[in-house]
């Protein structure tokens, strides 16, 4: 049996003991000296500043982890939920206007865990440059996607790169120290998972969305982040990229998986540093092992779908989502999603009919902190109507280069980024809903489609107001997966600090 597989199996069966140091650790993990990497030179760098509210929220996310880590390595752990939380929360309400030098905030942590900071910094640069590309004006969607592919190649070329393979989250969160930080510091952990919500939800807000249509979405998303997501202490698990941005994750599965693996590394480090029974030497060893587990080099020559189940080398993923690792209790057909329960990610979340394998049709619905994929505009609208509060629909049109973005108010009235949008809705058998429920960028495009499809020749186009008033309710094809929450009982309520 190869050593890597044997190591994975040993650590799984010995979850009550500390993971052991593998013999093939990269030598740079023992070198804490500065080795600064910086942005790939490009015209789009810092284009996140085109949306100041979003930029400031993102810059502020760099503060919390650094402050908490510095507190934990300098004897301040008992004050994390009080003094440290209050300082971080103040920063989140008075955000910096420029990127934050985390090393200046956490100098002691940097001296002790310099190799970890290299991994964090390199991944965070990828986060920001991907955002910059999507916010860059004047480029086509194809140009942006090609550049993001190049960014991933550039990122992966460094030894500090985190694997883009889906990894088993139940395994990575199943060590003897796992869960300690979130149990003892629910408010601070809530802030961290709130950061991860913002860092994952923004990609579908930006991906293939015209630059001028991004700001309106953030008015809703940013408010949700600052008012609710930052202070939640009732999450079962950290937000996952394919949960929050399924369109982005399907196109860039390696980047989506790497972001999830990065966030799981953050959780591992939080839990290790929170262990009062470990010596400083033991903590440093466990942090190195945690880094090793998620490095790209550790999983060389492995592919999505490779499986030593529930181990370090379990790269299975839910059907149709190669950018998402297996969650607790999940299999290839279903997974438990926060706020939604058990879902089959290959099926429409509203009508339970399989999502189309290809083609431009389909949509996503974002509401109440979650994002789900649906087959058609009718499913998107009616699912939004089931959910209190505001919603965002992102939907394909007949033009593959024009994404429709619909935003509702509290009363369910919709605004559109395409002024001339018209809708086809000729209610029929639900398995064919993506044929008879569509959006078009103009009346001319609608007429062209109905002319080519005579069964719709007598159907009148609907404007946005009339379309928004319709509601066919929950379809008879909907099937709920009735299984218990694999995480057990949730913690009640939200944290303080609003």
Image: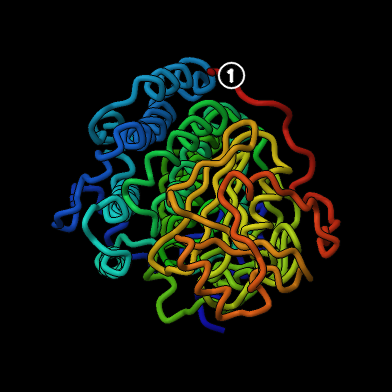
Q: Nearer the viewer, residue 358 or 294?
A: 358
Packing grade of label 1 (10 A; few <14, some 14-19, many >=20) is: few
Q: Is residue 381 visible?
A: yes
Going by the image, does 59 lie left or right of 182?
Answer: left
Residue 384 lies, with reference to residue 323, above or below; the image says above
Q: Position of residue 388 (x, y in %)?
A: 69, 35
The residue singled out by tag 1 in the image is 496
Q: Position of residue 204 (x, y in %)?
A: 46, 53
Q: Is residue 177 visible?
A: no
Q: Position of residue 51 (x, y in %)?
A: 30, 38
Going by the image, does 367 lie left or right of 442?
Answer: right
Residue at image coords 14%, 54%: 43
Residue at image coords 46%, 44%: 283
Specify the quadrant that holds the C terminus: top right
Q: Position of residue 102 (x, y in %)?
A: 28, 35
SS of the residue under disc 1: loop
Residue at image coords 48%, 69%: 398
Specify the quadrant that holds the N terminus: bottom right
Residue at image coords 65%, 73%: 456
Residue 279 lies, with reference to residue 375, above or below; the image says above
């Amino acid at each position: 049996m190869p050593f890597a597989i044997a190591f994975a199996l040993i650590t799984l069966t010995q979850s009550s003991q500390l993971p052991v140091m593998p013999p093939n650790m990269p030598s740079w993990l023992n070198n804490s000296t500065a080795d600064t990497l910086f942005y790939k030179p490009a015209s789009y760098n810092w284009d996140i500043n085109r949306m100041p509210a979003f930029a400031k929220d993102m810059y502020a996310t760099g503060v919390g982890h650094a402050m908490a880590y510095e507190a934990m390595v300098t004897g301040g752990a008992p004050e994390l939920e009080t003094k440290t939380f209050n300082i971080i929360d103040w920063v989140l309400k008075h955000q910096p206007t420029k990127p934050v030098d985390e090393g200046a905030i956490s100098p002691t942590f940097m001296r002790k865990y310099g190799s970890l900071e290299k991994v964090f910094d390199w991944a965070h640069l990828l986060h920001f440059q991907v955002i910059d590309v999507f916010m860059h004006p004047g480029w086509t969607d194809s140009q942006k996607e090609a550049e993001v592919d190049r960014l991933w190649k550039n990122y992966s070329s460094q030894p500090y790169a985190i694997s883009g393979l889906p990894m088993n989250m139940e395994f990575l969160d199943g060590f003897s120290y796992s869960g300690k930080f979130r149990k003892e510091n629910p408010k601070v952990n809530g802030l961290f998972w709130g950061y991860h919500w913002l860092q994952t939800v923004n990609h579908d807000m930006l991906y293939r969305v015209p630059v001028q249509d991004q700001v309106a979405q953030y008015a809703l998303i940013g408010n949700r982040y600052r008012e609710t997501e930052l202070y939640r202490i009732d999450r079962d698990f950290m937000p996952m990229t394919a949960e929050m941005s399924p369109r982005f994750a399907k196109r860039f599965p390696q980047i989506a998986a790497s972001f999830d693996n990065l966030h799981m590394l953050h959780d591992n480090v939080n839990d290790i540093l929170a262990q009062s029974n470990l010596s400083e030497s033991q903590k440093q060893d466990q942090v190195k092992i945690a880094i090793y587990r998620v490095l790209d080099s550790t999983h060389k020559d492995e592919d999505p779908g490779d499986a030593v189940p529930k181990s370090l080398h379990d790269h299975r993923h839910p059907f149709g989502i190669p950018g998402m690792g297996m969650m607790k209790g999940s299999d290839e057909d279903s997974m438990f999603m926060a706020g939604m329960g058990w879902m089959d990610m290959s099926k429409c979340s509203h009508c339970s009919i399989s999502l189309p394998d290809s083609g431009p049709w389909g949509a996503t619905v974002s509401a109440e902190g979650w994002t789900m994929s649906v087959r058609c505009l009718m499913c998107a609208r009616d699912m939004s109507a089931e959910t209190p509060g505001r919603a965002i629909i992102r939907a394909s049109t007949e033009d593959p280069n024009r994404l429709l973005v619909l935003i509702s108010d509290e009363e369910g009235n919709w605004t559109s980024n395409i002024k001339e949008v018209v809708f086809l809705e000729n209610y029929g058998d639900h398995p064919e809903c993506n044929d008879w429920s569509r959006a078009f960028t103009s009346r001319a495009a609608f007429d062209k489609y109905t002319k080519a499809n005579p069964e719709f020749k007598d159907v009148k186009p609907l404007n946005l107001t009339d379309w928004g008033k319709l509601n066919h309710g929950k379809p008879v094809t909907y099937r709920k997966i009735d299984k218990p929450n694999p995480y057990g009982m949730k913690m009640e309520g939200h944290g303080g600090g609003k």
